[in-house]
Amino acid sequence: MTTTLRPSGPLQQADDGTLARSYEVCVNSRPVGAVRVATLPAPGRPLGTISDLRVDEADRGRGRGTVAALAAEEVLRGWRCERIRVSVPAGAHAARRLAGALGYVETGHVLAKDLGPVDGADPADPADPEGPVPGGVGIRAMTDAEAAAWIAAEPGRAALLPDGPATDGTRLHVAVRDGTRIGHLWTGWRDLPTGERVPYVWEVAVAASERGRGHGRRLMRFAERVVRDAGGGRLVLRVDPGNAPARALYASLGYRPLLTDLEKTLY
């Protein structure tokens, strides 16, 4: 029996040039599942994604998912993608094993936190945005000049911020001590592979000389308050699997695994 992909919808192209299309997974022309392929904006060639891969229960265990994933990779190769990312839900062990068998390598953990109501500041917590400011450090919005220089410093930022700091939902802040920038925070929106659009921390960083002093925690608490003030109830971020200090910080703040990102290079 032959497993193939058959388009189930038109090829969609967004204003930024990214592509997306849904397919049926077929065995001898009989639909047995579905998959979606798309591209994401990235420096150089687009980054491909495979999502919503599903095989009907009666047809599982016969390699249909493996063949469908390989066929989806060929679609993305035709779209000039050099890398593919898949996002596996936390606890989806079978999907994680399939991705590993196909050569995908873990590149990031997507974490989420449900934001409850604010009951007021904790004056004993130096990281609380409403509590005492540690070491004279404050958080303020980036100026237009700062934002332009900051975006230009990383090509990937420009691709994700087509309208600069005016990009929908974008908030850019800096942490400052005595007039010197010691960190920054970039929050905005992200479309998850599940189709959900969520408030997202794109970047949070503290200068190496200032780490270990609670500034990262303070920036994250500030991000949470920004989201709450805008009416959001959840905040999502992505962390490198090898960044143990950041993973420990996020765990202590109540962030829990949502997705595991894995990537593969096409040769």
Image (cartoon, rainbow, N blue to C red):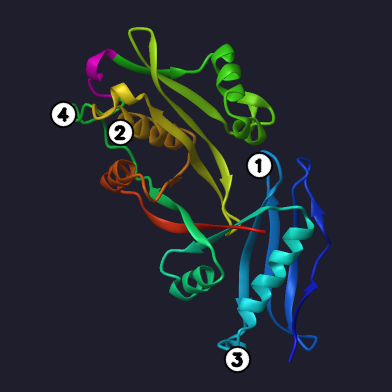
| Quadrant of the snapshot with the N terminus | bottom right
In the image, is residue 29 above or below residue 212? below
Label 3 neighbour load within 10 Å: few <14, some 14-19, many 20+: few
* Label 1 or label 4, whichever comes before in sequence order: 1
Asked whether disc 3 touches disc 2, contact meaning CB atoms under 8 Å apart, the reply is: no
Residue at the spot 41% in from the left edge and 51% down from the top edge: 111
| Mark 4 → mark 3, Cα distance in angstroms | 57 Å
| Mark 1 → mark 3, Cα distance in angstroms | 38 Å
Outermost residue on the top side: it is 179
Label 2 neighbour load within 10 Å: few <14, some 14-19, many 20+: many
Q: Nearer the viewer, mark 4 or mark 3?
A: 3
Q: Is residue 106 left or right of residue 65?
A: left
Give how far across and how far down residue 208 sits, in percent.
33, 26
Query: Which amino acid type is shown beneath numbered disc 4?
Result: Ala
Q: Which mark is residue 58?
A: 3
Span shown in magenta? 130-136
